[in-house]
Image (cartoon, rainbow, N blue to C red):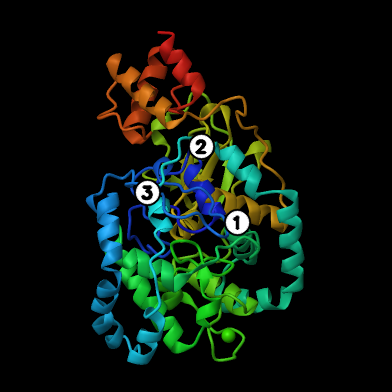
Amino acid sequence: MGIATRTFATILACAAGLVVAAAPATAQERRADLVTGSIDTRAAPPVAPQGPVWSGESGASGDPSMTAAAIRAAAANFHVCLEGLWPQAARRGVSRRLFESATASLTPDLRIMDLLDAQPEFTKAVWDYLDVLVTDARIAKGRELLARYERTFDAVERAYGVDRYVIAAIWGVETNYGTISGQKPVLRSTATLACIGRRQNYFRAEFLDTLEIIQRGDIKPEKLVGSWAGAFGPTQFMPSAFKRYAVDFDGDGRRDVIDSVPDMIASTANNLKKDGWVQGATWGYEVVVPATFDFHLTGRDHAMSLRDWQRLGVARPHGLAFPRPDDKAFLLVPAGIQGPGFLMLHNFRVIMRYNPAEAYALAIGHLSDRLRGGASFVQHWPRYERVLTRAERLQLQEELARRGFDVGEPDGRVGARTRDAIRDFQAHIGRVPDGFASAGLLEQLMAR
Ligand code: CA
């Protein structure tokens, strides 16, 4: 997946092995999920509250605008660049007075350049990711908040038709119910990214949207703090997402997704509704996948009805039935045959529009079920498996290629082509061809 710009949750999502990217600028690039095609290359370490200073080094992306010299040059030109955005700000109704007061003493936060191009060596297994985000404490706190704001949730469900448990889960996963959120001023972050680095076009709009929010008076500038990419509030709205989805639900005339719980809950619901949430339907089901299953049928491109999946032997544990067997779903098998499978319904895709990471959406879905009173997954994860490091993924690709399995150009990312090559290798040695890249698989490969 791409850059995880928002929160601890997203950072983890990006590090989780199974995450696959959505296209950039899909329904929403809202949270600056600067998706590049594979999750494991761009996640950033959590930012300390005071934040270290810029490393002074060139970014790992190799983008010409991310060299240390280009960053220094752009930083020196920062105010000229911002001033160049004034005509666009004026067209959006931003006053000259506000523009000047907002930008006059602004300095770029170059530390963000390190975060924009961070490439972690280690990735997190999906089970570790879920362990961190779906805890007893987070379930208990979520239930407490659902009870405390019951009337608000009642009213929001009536108005938007979006499941309260999913909204509460987003609140819990994004920021641990508002307790872990960034402290960087949104105006400074978006201004920095608008004028420096490799995503300037995208962030210019975010910067201008930030000015508009301040101009309208929805949120006071000093309250507008968040992640290094500019996502703010307990459910992490990017400025552009705020513009599209924020609503004033408590009726005070301001859309305040930071300090008004009713506004925050309703705005998040409105977001999911506008993204296509199907009222009364769930996100997906844990399923048991038979060892004889054709694993080429996994993934988002292979949707069919739950009934058809059942015909292929994919079933819920304990013989439970699918309540709506004609609903379309796709199969996700994050840890291969040794872990649980999941049939994902339309609402799972809606959650992925909020944040295009499969591990993220799975965490949201599972936490929502737990908040509702549901149980843990029935099947175990292969916790004995170690997720490959970046160097090992590259090694895996090179070794597969050396043995004649087509991985394309080795790039250290396990995409569809690499998974196909893994399946071919597994079939070749008589294993279940599930395409799961693990340390165990690399050992099997090296033993050949
Ligand atoms: Ca309000």
Work out whether residue 182 or residue 233 is closer to the camera in this orientation and state it: 182
Query: Could you say where residue 446 lies in the image, as x and y percent from the top left?
Result: 42, 12
| Residue that numbered label 3 is attached to | 117
Point out the quarter of the image occupied by ligand 1.
bottom right
Query: Could you say where residue 316 lies in the image, as x and y percent from the top left?
Result: 61, 40
Residue furthest toward the top? 448
Work out whether residue 264 or residue 379 is closer to the camera in this orientation and state it: 264
Within 10 Å of disc 1 (Cα), the crowding (few <14, some 14-19, many 20+) is many
Q: Residue at x 32, y 72 (%)?
A: 205
Query: Could you say where residue 231 lies in the image, as x and y percent from the top left?
Result: 48, 66
Q: Earlier in the sequence, mark 1 or mark 3?
A: 3
Residue 20: image quadrant is top left
Judging from the image, what secondary structure is the residue with disc 3 in? Answer: loop
Q: Residue at x 40, y 8 (%)?
A: 448
Q: CA distance from mark 1 to mark 2?
A: 19 Å
Residue 168: image quadrant is bottom right
Label for residue 20? none
Within 10 Å of disc 3 (Cα), the crowding (few <14, some 14-19, many 20+) is many
Image-based side of 182 in relation to 145, left or right: left
Q: Residue at x 63, y 49 (%)?
A: 133
Mark 3 and mark 2 in contact? Answer it, CB < 8 Å.
Answer: no
Q: Is mark 1 within 8 Å of ligand 1?
A: no
